[in-house]
Image (cartoon, rainbow, N blue to C red):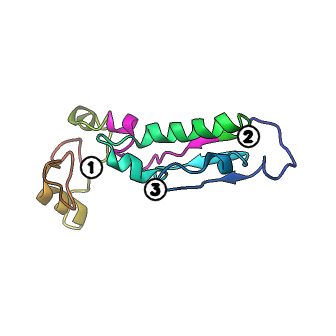
């Protein structure tokens, strides 16, 4: 870390709490040195919003913690393996133009690829008629990898 070490147990402890039904208690979170909130925090709130606003609620959650104790370090954990449409900054690049420029990996296109077969059969996603499996960029993108 770039900050000075401390023997104070609370100040040197990391936690990743969650309250899926709403905001996590900021007073409790502010008792720790580093708090990390991930996508599942306040899930009931951001799932109800259209478009989803998970990322904005993570920022609000950290602001609530920092308002109580500015010394607490707070971060929003973001998965870098998946493109998550509920994160505004990730959703902003989920379009055909970015897919064609190679921003996303495509499924292997061979006989052993169950995912590729599902994607081909499902076709593009239709928000009006959600299905258990659809491919937002079916047929788009670069060569299969």
Element class at badge 2:
loop
x then y, percent, for residue 76: 54, 42
Mark positioned earlier in the residue sequence (3 or 2) = 2
x then y, percent, for residue 111: 19, 66
Tell me, yes or no, whether the highlighted magenta stretch contains residue 87. yes
Q: Which mark is residue 1?
A: 2
Circle nearer the viewer, 1 or 3: 3
Residue indicated by mark 1:
106
Q: What crowding class fits label 2: few (fewer than 14 Cα within 10 Å), some (14-19), or many (20 or more)?
A: few
Q: What crowding class fits label 3: few (fewer than 14 Cα within 10 Å), some (14-19), or many (20 or more)?
A: few
In the rendered view, tell whether residue 11 sits above or below residue 93: below
The answer to the question of whether label 1 and label 2 lie on touching residues, with beta carbons closer than 8 A, is no
Residue in view at x 33 percent, y 38 percent:
91
Q: Observer-nearest residue: 7 or 65? A: 65
Mark positioned earlier in the residue sequence (1 or 2) = 2
Tell me, yes or no, whether the highlighted magenta stretch contains residue 79. yes
Residue indicated by mark 3:
21
In the rendered view, tell whether residue 145 sits above or below residue 73: below
Q: CA distance from mark 3 to mark 2?
A: 32 Å
x then y, percent, for residue 50: 29, 41
């Amino acid at each position: 870390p770039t900050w000075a070490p401390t023997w104070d147990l609370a100040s040197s402890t990391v936690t990743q709490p969650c309250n899926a039904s709403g905001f996590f208690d900021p007073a409790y979170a502010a008792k720790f040195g580093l708090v990390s909130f991930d996508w599942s925090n306040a899930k009931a709130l951001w799932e109800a919003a259209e478009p989803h606003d998970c990322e904005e609620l993570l920022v609000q959650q950290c602001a609530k913690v920092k308002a109580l104790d500015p010394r607490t370090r707070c971060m929003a954990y973001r998965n870098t393996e998946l493109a998550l449409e509920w994160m505004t900054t990730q959703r902003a690049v989920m379009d055909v133009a970015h897919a064609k420029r190679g921003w996303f990996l495509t499924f292997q296109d061979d006989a052993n690829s169950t995912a590729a077969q599902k994607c081909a059969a499902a076709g593009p996603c239709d928000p009006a008629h959600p299905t258990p499996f659809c491919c937002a960029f079916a047929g788009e993108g670069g060569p299969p990898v």
